[in-house]
Image: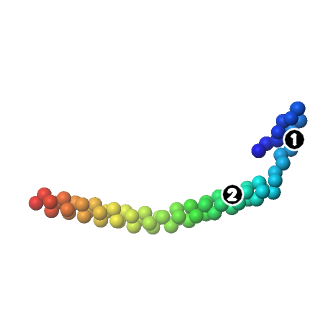
């Protein structure tokens, strides 16, 4: 929130203690989410490899089922 213009004067911003506390909590929450997101992204490297193998196995199963059904 910026200063309020009243009759040509720029009044200073008045921040209550509750607003300051809210801003601090939001800051802590955002930092926590960033750390968790970075951690998930870093651990996802090995997960992506595992997911690729699972997808490959699923594709092979579908291929085998299609071959069995056509014979």
Query: What is the distance, in whole Å, between disc 1 and disc 2 at their CAs?
Result: 26 Å
Judge left or right: residue 59 versus residue 46. left
Judge left or right: residue 45 versus residue 17. left
Residue at 84% over, 36% down: 5
Q: Which residue is mark 2?
A: 26
Q: Disc 1 on helix, strand or loop?
A: strand
Quadrant of the image for the N terminus?
top right
The percent coordinates of residue 30 (x first, y second) are: 65, 58
Describe the colour scheme in one phrase: rainbow
Q: Which residue is mark 1?
A: 11
The percent coordinates of residue 48 (x first, y second) are: 43, 63
Residue at 73% over, 57% down: 22
Q: Disc 2 on helix, strand or loop?
A: helix
Which corner quadrant of the image does residue 58 belong to? bottom left
Judge left or right: residue 17 versus residue 31. right
Which corner quadrant of the image does residue 51 belong to? bottom left
């Amino acid at each position: 929130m910026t200063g309020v213009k009243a009759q040509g004067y720029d009044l200073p911003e008045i921040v209550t203690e509750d607003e300051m506390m809210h801003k601090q909590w939001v800051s802590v929450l955002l930092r926590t989410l960033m750390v968790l997101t970075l951690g998930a992204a870093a651990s996802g490297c090995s997960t992506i490899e595992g997911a690729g193998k699972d997808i490959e196995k699923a594709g092979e199963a579908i291929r085998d089922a299609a071959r069995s059904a056509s014979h």
